[in-house]
Amino acid sequence: MYKNWKAICAVRNPHLKRLIITANEKELGRLAQGFPELFLEKEQEHSGPFPLSLLRKVADDLKAKCFRPDRHPNDVWGDIIPGLPLALGEIGLDSEWCVHPEGNESGVFGENPHMMSDELIRNYRKLYKGYRRDMVFPWGLRIVHWEEVPYFLGDFDHLKCFLVYPAAMVDLNS
């Protein structure tokens, strides 16, 4: 049984949404009996849109797992930031590197990475100026337009590149 995120995002009751997002397997089985339209037999190839509350829960769970009293905050964020795209990818929300031409000189992003548009290159410093690790997506909702498509701004890399998440895959009202 798989969650039907499109149907879940359409649910108007915030308590029901939260219950579905946080329910364990046993509870999900009971919910599926009462709300079969919110579940699917087969996994969707392109699931989404995803409730913002779910994405923040995934991020907060990762953050809670990484923070320990014996660790320096910089070390913790060093685990959270690279782990976040993996954690969100596990539920189906993929990210993509937006590569500055100067950032791929070593070929670290492959032979044909997705390059920044001229507009993003011009605005890179302004975008980076407001960067804070604790405000990357999904905690922060900074939008960039890349080839006229809106994306949420994720982590910045030291190679003048940043992660983006497709805004169309996120339901901000959930």
Image (cartoon, rainbow, N blue to C red):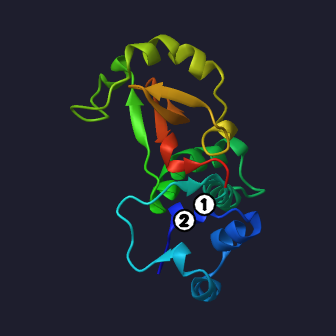
The answer to whether any part of residue 18 appears in the image is yes
Question: The residue under label 2 is which amino acid type?
Answer: Ala
Q: Nearer the viewer, residue 126 or 145?
A: 145
**Residue 27 coordinates in the image, percent (x, y):** 65, 85
Q: Nearer the viewer, residue 174 or 69?
A: 174
Q: Which residue is mark 1?
A: 10
Alpha carbon distance from label 1 to label 2 = 5 Å
Residue most toward the left? 111
Q: Residue at x 58, y 21 (%)?
A: 127
- Report the side of 53 relative to 114 (left or right): right
The answer to whether any part of residue 158 appears in the image is no
- Report the side of 89 relative to 15 (left or right): left
**Residue 120 coordinates in the image, percent (x, y):** 45, 18
Question: Which quadrant holds the C terminus?
Answer: bottom right
Label 2 packing within 10 angstroms: few (<14), some (14-19), many (20+):
few
| Residue 65: quadrant of the picture | bottom right
- In this rendering, is residue 49 above or below 121? below
Q: Which residue is mark 2?
A: 7
State the SS at label 2. helix
